Image (cartoon, rainbow, N blue to C red):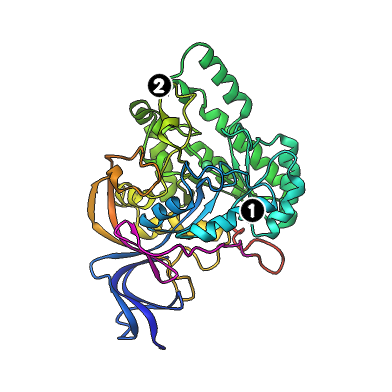
Amino acid sequence: MPDADLVVRGGAVVLRHGVERADVAITDGVVTAVGPDLGRTGVTEVDATGLHVLPGVVDPHVHFNEPGRTHWEGIASGSAALAAGGGTTYLDMPLNSLPATTDGPAFDGKRAAAEAASHADFGLWGGLVPGGLGRLEELAGRGAAGFKAFLCDSGVAEFAPVDDLTLVEGMRRCADLGALVAVHAESATMVAGLARRAVAAGRTGARDFAESRPVIAELEAISRAVFLAGETGCSLHVVHVSTPLGVELVERASAAGVDVTCETCPHYLVLTVDDLEELGAVAKCAPPLRSAADGDGLWKLIARGALPIVASDHSPCPPELKAGADLFQAWGGISGCQTTLNLLLAEGHGRRGLPLASVAAITAGNAARRFGLAGKGAIEVGADADLAIVDLSREWNLQTSELRYRHRHSPYAGRRVRGRVVRTLLRGRTVALDGRPVAPPGGRLLRPSVDRNGQRAGSQRTW
Ligand SMILES: [Zn+2]
């Protein structure tokens, strides 16, 4: 074996099929060998004895809000927080930045900002919005990760929801482009009507907000999107599904031949509507937090492999937008890109016995495959050396002082987390040490890989 630049020595390495005590040799940022006792080939060595080595988290759903709303988060602080939590790749959503990423120049502007400031590799979602169909091709040509559409109000005026005609025509074009469409699935008319009714009656508390966005509104929208994906031959991904019934709709459509997947988020797995009532707007999101039974159901779907991806949907804002008792007025969005791995290690692996290989699959491998991120999401020869080195013996209650976000609020404050991330490596380079960024930004744009037939590499259902 030729000399490696770096050997991560003696860790419990989380591979696709299980955990093995092994060394990981890295040359030019790429894994060149994984195995026991690789010999003294490394120019530099990292001692991982007693530690676990996981693939760096691949978070396909964040809003870092740059350019334009950098004061809400920004790429530098958002990606530093991700790296501190073991993250090495993210896909940034097209909205909440200004301009929204709905045309080529907006994509170029966000790409330049991320190349200057990102501590992790990144992909950029484009937007599918009314009037924007003529822009899909220029976005796909620049390497957009896929196209995000809202079936209900997005929360920001500059990113309009799709009508059914825009959705079906957009899906047709995306099918031709080999691009994937991601949808926020809640019925616009149901949630708007229920919200109007609640606000008019002065019912603006946490439970009123949750009841204005019922499960049926989510299921109706998922059903519609899945139907149109089947009709158009478009690859579909349903973001942040909050209820097991939603995942089951996706599962049934997939079994019937529609190319559809979905994700859930840590907040639907570890928080409930009772937490929303207790914590207030810091735990506001859409779809809203649901019941403990919904959370249990989602964990069961993860355990049997039917729910392949857990994304943070990190959607931060300044604290003043979370102030006040009116839950309809407060900004909806949870800050969470730093804590996904720690929460899943505590609640999933620790409390519910989810194998570490499954934790790695739902936090990294499956998203990398689905979104065609070549070289990402798994520790194997030829892959990028993106690693989260974790001390699983460490378990503690999360403190907001640990957070690297621009605004250090989190609905998980005080909650049990596990697995201190002692070092994060991006392509073999240490980017975070014990929760602190330690290297200048060096993130690169990732384009979804496409095979010779123009089909997305990740489009087949492989889990
Ligand atoms: Zn989102």
State the image coordinates of residue 192 (x, y, percent, origin top left).
59, 23
State the image coordinates of residue 193 (x, y, percent, origin top left).
59, 20
Q: Which of marks 1 and 2 is nearer the N terminus?
A: 1
Label 1 packing within 10 angstroms: few (<14), some (14-19), many (20+): many
Distance of mark 1 from mark 2, alpha carbons?
Answer: 37 Å
Residue bearing mark 1: 107
State the image coordinates of residue 404 (x, y, percent, origin top left).
36, 49
- Please identify the quarter of the rendering in which residue 176 is found: bottom right
Between 224 and 382, the one nearer to me in the picture? 382
Q: Is residue 436 one of those drawn in magenta? A: yes
Q: What stretch is highlighted in magenta?
A: 421-449
Say above or below: 412 vs 446: above
Specify the amino acid type for callout 1: Phe
Residue at the spot 54% in from the left edge and 44% down from the top edge:
239
Secondary structure at badge 1 equals helix
Residue bearing mark 2: 325
Residue at the spot 40% in from the left edge and 38% down from the top edge:
295
State the image coordinates of residue 350 (x, y, percent, origin top left).
28, 51
Between 291 and 130, the one nearer to me in the picture? 130
Q: In this view, does 211 lie to the left or right of 446?
A: left
Label annotation for residue 74: none
Residue at the spot 63% in from the left edge and 25% down from the top edge:
189
Residue at the spot 50% in from the left edge and 47% down from the top edge:
64
Marker count (numbered): 2
Can you see residue 106?
A: yes
